[in-house]
Image: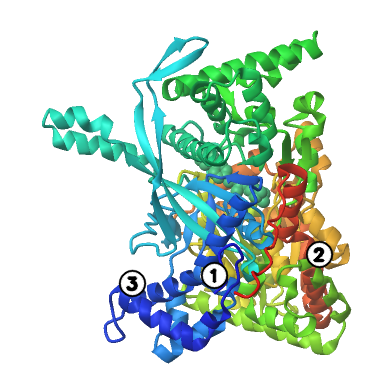
Amino acid sequence: MASLGAFEYDKRLNTVDALRRSIANRLVYAVGKDLRSATQRDWLFAVFYAVRDRIMDCWRETRAQVDDQDAKRVYYLSMEFLTGRALTNAMLAADIYEPVRQACAQLGADFDALIDLEPDAGLGNGGLGRLAACFLDSMATLGLPGMGYGIRYEYGMFAQRIEHGQQVEEPDYWLVNGYPWEFMRPESSYTVRFGGRLVPQNGNSLWLDTEDVIATAYDSGVPGSAMRSVVTMRLWSARASGGVNLDAFNRGDYIQAVEEKNQSENVSRVLYPDDRTEHGRELRLRQEYFFVSASLQDILWRHLRNHTGFEQLADKVAIHLNDTHPALAVPELMRLLLDEHQLDWATAWGLCTRIFSYTNHTLMEEALESWPVELLTRMLPRHMGLIYEINARFLAEVHRRFPSDNALLRRISLIEERGVRRVLMANLSVLASHKVNGVSDLHSKLMVDTIFSDFVQMYPERFCNKTNGITPRRWLSQANPSLSALIDSRIGPDWRRDLDQLARLRELADEPEFQNSFQLAKQHNKRRLADMIARNPGVVVDPESLFDVQAKRMHEYKRQLLNVLHIITRYHCILAQPQADWVPRTVVFAGKAASAYYMAKLIIRLINDVARVINNDSRTGGRLRVVFIPNYRVSLAEIIIPGANLSEQISTAGTEASGTGNMKFALNGALTIGTWDGANIEIANNVGLENIFVFGNRTEKVAELRGYGYRPRDYYEDNFELKCAIDRLAEGAFSPEEPDRYRDVVNALLESDHYQLLADYADYCDCQDKVDDLYRRPAAWTRSAILNVAGMGAFSSDRTIREYASEIWGVQPLAVPQPASGS
Ligand code: 26Q
């Protein structure tokens, strides 16, 4: 084995024999079973432990290197990490997938079944949470000294069942069987305080009589490609502190004492579903402060372990805010530096603005986070005081630079004064950060033109773009073994770490043999998806039909309803012209609606009602099928996405900050039908406009329509097919047992149509006809699909993270140690 200080992976551990021995050994000594008594779950754990053992050395070595090199670290603060399953990813990173599979076979364990037994770590809602997971993967792959900090929710994203066509939520108690990938670190526990009162003390404040919660760290390792390094994801779990309950306990009120304990442990109980317009949930604010406070105490502790004082803090530490959810990190760092470490204001604030950076993920005004001043004052009095002080100093500066602009002062303030006074978390985040980025070219441009235009006047140099990316390890190598093997056979395996190499596929796009193999891979993945659909929801679909997929969270702005309007129209057209040469289509939907989001849930029900009517109508001759796949999550995406021919990315222009699903589909050889929105634009530029289906109004036109009074009814009156689709919906053609069921949908469309579906409907339907035309020419379609894959190099999250590292965080990859000689 290599000596300490120079990591060298011992490949002898990776043979089938060695792995078989390890797995059997772990089954006996870690799981406590043997070959005769092992259940599937026992095998899963035994394999898990054997694989985990093979990343431990690299993980330990990574931590040692960061310490030894005293490298600047980046801390990625995120309320969500949507990592999904860990096992296959780890086997691929350690390059032991095949030997583990064989070892399992020799032991008589059903490899595929046990892989499928691992629950998803669903600690996120969608895009933002999955982005955080891809970023950790890329940091590990690039060897960047970094860490992710978040919350160890006991209940992740709810599980979705469909009952009578409607969404039913079930708790996702993902930890029931234990989670073999995490390590509890009780020595890394911190007190997080809430409530209490302030007592002024020489300029600063004493914060007394607080309710205290203990945050305890749980670490898991995120292995990079080829085990370049292993990044730590540290999630905090809440424990009651002894103190609060002691009184009741001493009074003999044991039950009362335990109940209070329960209360404080609620903080890390459950992930909030993304309901972007629902604000002010007190427990959500507690969660935000809880994880931010624990993380910052941990960061400062680690710094002081190796440094005296804070002189070098900003040279050693970068802290990134994933949206405004961790924005309380700003007053918390100020509090720690001022009250606990006695720095002066100017020094402390100077450190903040060098340390923090912030990513914005939404432009929708109503989705920007804000908290009532009253609530903050009650829960975090010291922080509210610090926010006032930060604001006062800032407004003085604004006034000095723009003396006569009182309107500017009102707009730019951290505190909104209209109605109930609220703290605007985005303004706080921008003010404290040296860099603020959007997540696609378009989004970043709109960001400076709209929500942050006033801040641009003050700090133009802060604003920049970092287009999102996805990890090719999970989203191609792991999810799509068939296509990966084909790519390997032509350009070798290095695209996994250098996705730009996919460009070499361009010259193969016209080669019949390559096209043929490419089609075979796609067919294989479509059959895999069709088999899954046959099991749940239990619909038989034809793998030869065009698989048209919209898989993402249910949101009005994403316009699943526009897709439904097209389906209804197509259905009517097939019935009207049954002899015409229709391209058989299977339209697949998947996605969760926030539990309190009425419209989104109603649209799920509509999809299921439309599916029932169309799938049971023999007059279509099977040329149209509609399917809603329940419980969309990372592990399901890994099957759905490779099986798609067509990727639906149809948000109203200017509303989807970036999208990342769009990248996953294109990387797996689906063609996109999409609006000129988010990263769709950059995908179009990279794959070529002739290889993507673009439709609909652009942002200027959307804004113009909004400006001079958009009248959806005009589109309805002027378009016969549209009128038919909406009329049938309104008459209850898809809900004969309750003809009124979709009245609210119809009214929303005709009366306001906030996302302008009707304005884009005609162009969307025309564009869908062009999709059919191309699909009728398999060679031309396949050529385009290949050129999509070939053009996706730029969308690796490795590219994104390299840009963050050099342009925002100022962190460098760890030096690769030379193996110690003679060891
Ligand atoms: C807020 C308050 C209370 C409860 C929940 C929330 C909440 C939770 C999650 C608000 C928003 C989110 C998630 C947002 C999100 O996923 N945004 C997406 O981020 C992606 C990564 O940048 C982009 O690609 C998508 O365009 C964007 O919609």
Q: Give the left or right position of residue 114, taking residue 764 as reference.
A: left
For the point 47% across and 59% down, the residue is: 121
> Answer yes or no: do the residues labelled 1 and 2 have beta carbons within 8 Å?
no
Q: Residue at x 44, y 72 (%)?
A: 48
Is the CB–ligand 1 distance for label 3 below 8 Å?
A: no
Q: Amino acid at mark 3?
A: Ala
Ligand 1 shown in quarter: top right
- Badge 1 amino acid: Ala
669 relative position to 460: left or right: left
Q: Residues within 10 Å of mark 3 (few under 14, many from 20)?
A: some
Mark linked to residue 692: 2
Q: Which residue is pictured at 28% across the width and 40% down the height?
A: 262
User: Could you tell me residue 528's position as x and y percent?
Assistant: 57, 80
Q: Quadrant of residue 8?
A: bottom right
In the image, 298 versus 511, the foreground residue is 298
**Is residue 402 depicted above or below 644 in this figure?**
above
Q: Which mark is residue 90?
A: 1
Instruction: Name the residue rendered at 51%, 33% in the picture.
Output: 279
Q: Are marks 3 and 2 in contact (CB under 8 Å)?
A: no
What x and y, as percent, mark residue 510?
Answer: 87, 82
> Residue 30 shows which numbered tag?
3
Mark 2, Cα crowd under 10 Å, few <14 / some 14-19 / many 20+, is many
How far is disc 3 from disc 2 in space, using C-alphas?
Answer: 52 Å
